[in-house]
Amino acid sequence: MLKQFISIFQFSNPNKKIPLSWLQLTRERTRLTVALAGIGFADILMFMQLGFRDALYYSNVRFHTSLQGDIILINSQSNAVLSMKSFSQRRLYRALDLPTVQSVHSIYLDYTSWKNPETGRPRSILIFGFNPEVNIFNLPGIQENIEQLKLPDVVLYDRSSRLEYGPIAANIDAGKTVTAEVRRRRIKVGGLFTLGASFGADGNLITSDVNFLRIFSNRQRGLIDIGVIKLKPGANTSAVAEDLRNYLPKDINVLTKQEFIDFERNYWATSTAIGFIFTLGTIMGFIVGTVIVYQILYTEVADHLAEYATLKAIGYTQNYLLNVILQEALILALMGYLPGFLFALFMYKTAREATLLPVFMSLDRAVLVLILTILMCFISGAIAVRKLRSADPADIF
């Protein structure tokens, strides 16, 4: 064994261009395969947890991002779209007193029951109501069907809603008339728009404020859920928002559009268990990968402890041997990352088709997981190399 190791080491000199770390790893093909499978598994786990976490954040702020306004007003007791509290529309109109405000717009929203037209099974759906005289949503399909919303008992249906609501989009695309029961009221689907399912709502409807109040007959006109403010060109959004905070009563939360997006994102990240679970899953994937790589590298060092002692005896330093182990860790990280990345793409596609959530690969996430993989392997190598300290040259004699 010692002669074989010395032979391998001789082929690792710079003139031969074959590093010792590579020869060490490829000598035991089965062990290498197991190591790569473990790293790939850890990468897949981190990819999936980060992918679902980002899908959670992105899907729940698509509505916020679509608003065509500069400043948003909500009740100070509201935590997220899931739990909005109403406030008086008069608060919103008071914003018109500021000379920098161009226009104000009201939004009603609430959850109610949608009955599948084919099966009759009820399912909760989110409905938005606004004045269709001015389109305040930057979403595909709304402007094209804006006139439909002015008709009584007509709604627009989100084509990205889950299939449990029925084949609504397919029937509309086929030119069929679609009617359904919403909150025990018969309505007509006048067209389609695209928003997308989220962790808070599996499906969405948009209608006029008049139709909204017909559906929710218990809601009082003038008690709105969201106020959207458009500013005049050249106005400083942050400065106007601060002026409104000082001008309006404290029961109103004044947010810029980006603050409104961050407000929703922070709710899901810090106030719900699901955001913590995805973060914890990522950490667990990192730990699992670290343990797997450590076991592989530790076994590699332990099996060749006498050989490493020989290298020490002929003059090679502890730092050189550490460099060899860290090279092995880097090779394992890069080789294990690729299959994990490719399989994660397949899993993203499967999850996207099954849940209709925006689970996509991003460059930032791909780079982040690669960095975590390299860090994971380096930490494992640094821990495993401690075994080399016991490689006393006297042990081989």
Image: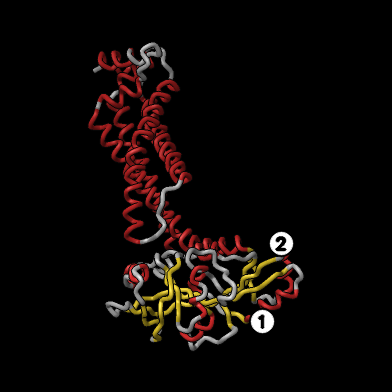
Tell me where residue 315 sits by quadrant.
Answer: top left
Name above or below for residue 84 compared with residue 326: below
Amino acid at the residue labelled 2? Pro
Point out the image quarter for the N terminus. top left
- Mark 1 in CB contact with mark 2 (< 8 angstroms): no
Residue depicted at x 32% and y 14%: 11
Q: Secondary structure at mark 2?
A: loop
Side of 185 relative to 259 (left or right): left
Tell me where residue 226 sits by quadrant.
Answer: bottom right
Q: Secondary structure at mark 1?
A: helix
Which residue position holds label 2?
A: 233
Whether residue 354 is visible = yes
Point out the image quarter for the C terminus. top left
Tell me where residue 228 sits by quadrant.
Answer: bottom right
Which residue position holds label 1?
A: 90
Residue 30: percent from left, percent from top? 23, 32
Side of 230 relative to 65 (left or right): right
Whether residue 75 is visible = no
Name above or below for residue 8 compared with residue 250: above
The scheme the figure's colours follow is secondary structure
Amino acid at the residue labelled 1? Arg
Mark 1 crowdedness (10 Å alpha carbons): few <14, some 14-19, many ≥20: few
Residue 207: percent from left, percent from top? 49, 77
Residue 345: percent from left, percent from top? 35, 47
